[in-house]
Amino acid sequence: MAKKLTLTFTRCVVQHYNDVSMISQDLLDVLVCPVCRKPVVLNADGKGLRCGECRRVYPVQDDIPIMLVDAAKIAD
């Protein structure tokens, strides 16, 4: 039987299948892009933090934001 996709949005918790990405709102409130110093927001899939100013997307691995410029990708 196929698994059912479930999305739950509670304090920036995104749950799908058995994979859960949890970053506290307190941490999100203090994280900024290391390039332009603007706030970052969690992507809908919970696997990246996006800067609205320079469009860089920083990966989240094992619930740890990787805020290294070399690890970021520039979104279209």
Image: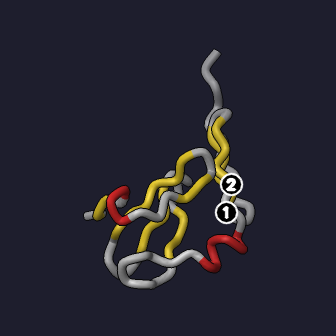
Indicate the quadrant where residue 74 lies.
bottom left
State the residue position of label 1.
12
Secondary structure beneath dot 1 equals loop
The N terminus lies in quadrant: top right
The C terminus lies in quadrant: bottom left
Picture layout, residue 2 above or below residue 6: above
Tell me whether the residue at label 1 lies in contact with that at label 2, contact meaning CB atoms closer than 8 angstroms: yes
Amino acid, disc 2: Met
Q: Of the numbered discs in the image, which one, if any, rests on residue 22?
A: 2
Q: Of the numbered discs in the image, which one, if any, rests on residue 3?
A: none
Secondary structure beneath dot 2 equals strand
Q: CA distance from mark 1 to mark 2?
A: 7 Å
What residue lies at 42% left-to-right and 76% top-to-bottom?
34
Q: Mark 2: give few (<14), some (14-19) or many (20+) Cα within 10 Å.
A: some
Residue lying farthest top? 1
| 59 horizontally vs 10: left or right | left
What residue lies at 36% left-to-right and 65% top-to-bottom?
69
User: Sequence order check: which comes first, mark 1 or mark 2?
Assistant: 1
**How far across and how far down the image is residue 64, in percent?**
59, 54
Amino acid, disc 1: Cys
Q: Mark 1: give few (<14), some (14-19) or many (20+) Cα within 10 Å.
A: some
Mark 1 vs mark 2, foreground winner is 2
